[in-house]
Amino acid sequence: MSTIKDAKINNTFTSDKPEISQWGVGMTPLKSEISKKEMFCKIAFDYLSFTFPYSIYYMEEFDEICSLLLLNENYEESPFGRNGYSLCKRWKNELDQDKETFTSFLYNGGTQTNNAYGEKTGFFELEGDGCRALEKRGGDKFPDYWREIFLQLKFNQKLKHVSITRFDFAIDVFNATFKLDEIVEALENRNVLTPFLRFDSSVGIEFASYDPDLHIIYVGSKKSDFFLCIYDKKEERESIGKTIEFDSWYRFEFRIKHKKADNFIMNILDKWNNDVSEISNFASELILKYVDIKDRPKQGVNSTPGIIASKQCMQKWKTNSKWLDFVGATKKADIVNYYKYESSITKNANWVNRSVSKTLAKLFLSNSEYFFVFLKKCVLEGFTRCKKSDYEYVNEFRSKHQMKKLEALEIDEICNKLNLDLEQTIQDMNIDIFFDENGELRGY
């Protein structure tokens, strides 16, 4: 029996496909195969956007990316940008010239479009049809050429400071053996174990937005940088007059943004060596990780549908056998955090800005002289409390930003310089420093 683990990632536009199918992207069977009514699945990279440093000094980088995306010079210039950019280059959609869907490049933005290094950026965007058009341009190069695109964006030394801003990873299921209504019922009955927050709308946590007309489910918050969207693709197509010859067509679409999108692509590269089928394994394990449908116990306090059980408790429940047969995975995806060092330091900076900055401002306004004494004491104490593991985090962060790693002697030099600089500031302000009876550093 076919499962999601048997999904194919392939190019629709290879020579053995005589026509462009209305049913979507990836591996789509010929019409003679449809009558079998067997479940089959396909995988698509359905959205990709990224930024990179761009100005008149970065035209070589722009040309490099155009070459990578197999784009020619036949684009339209538009004075209408978006997302903070005022100008746009647009390539016509090769699939349908009348469609208002393009491969877009946005540029000439304000300071809000600068990257973390203060560089002005440009923004490439490939929506679903843009991804399909790229596959058509590449022909037999796909699907493996996707791997080449990801590798170049991440590791090409000519393309420094590329940042993935959004990536959609979609799994299409045709003639499904597990119906969408069953997933909805499991969610509503709180029978789904997921890394996302618990299903508790009473405290304002969004777990699912269900529109009976469009049959859309959101697992996780749409406001977050990582969530799963499950919807009835057949119903969506039929609502615009298309004829779909499958019993059902469901889409599981992981929508990932910013640093998590960057990290997700790193995980795909980690799985995708020489065998493209590894992506199918990853897809099935990913669905099981984020939607693990459980069988409730027949007796006990948690036997009533809708009762919220703890994750620790639900982990002991048996996964629904029909769901396991549908997904085809026996283990859950292991998502490696390739940016844990950067994430940790960024979170620290955000926490200081959010939770400490107001206190520091009040301290400075109350006694600006004591503030510098306090700053010296805190920072120097911080150096003494740092361990080897803390400096490993720092150096990982620095290396990701093309900065030299710090050796022990260099750390000492930085510490001493900061001490001298603060000491000079205190002296210039004629602050009297002393230690009180509790050994605390004071100043007036």
Image (spheres, rainbow, N blue to C red):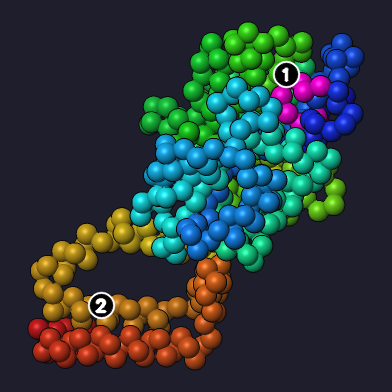
The region drawn magenta spans 19-27
First of labels 1, 2 by sequence position: 1
Residue 25 lies in the magenta-colored region:
yes
As helix, strand or loop, the secondary structure at mark 1 comes to loop
Q: Residue at x 52, y 34 (%)?
A: 220
Residue 2 placement: quadrant: top right
| 113 magenta-colored | no
Q: Which residue is mark 2?
A: 375
Q: Residue 79 occupies which quadrant of the picture?
A: top left
Q: Is residue 436 left or right of residue 388?
A: left
Q: 328 or 6, which lies in front?
A: 6
Disc 1 residue type (three-letter): Gln
Residue at coordinates 77% horizontally, 41% vertically from top-left? Answer: 138
Q: Which residue is mark 1?
A: 22
Q: Callout 2, which amino acid?
A: Leu
Quarter of the figure with the N terminus? top right
Q: Position of residue 219 (x, y in %)?
A: 55, 31
Crowd class of label 1 (few under 14; some 14 to 19; many from 20; radius 10 Å): few
Give left or right: position of 431 versus 187: left
Residue at image position (12%, 86%) is 429
Where does residue 23 sit, x and y in percent of width and height?
73, 20
Q: Quadrant of the C terminus?
A: bottom left
Percent from the top left, x then y, of residue 239? 59, 10
Does 390 sit above or below residue 30? below
Helix, strand or loop: magenta stretch: loop
Q: What kind of element bears circle 2?
A: helix
Residue 324, position as x, y percentages in the image: 76, 30
Is 367 located above or below residue 361 in the figure? below
Instruction: Name the residue located 81 percent from the left edge and 21 percent from the top edge.
Output: 19
Work out whether 1 lies above or below 372: above
Residue 318 seen by the camera: no
Left or right: 39 as drawn, with respect to 110: right
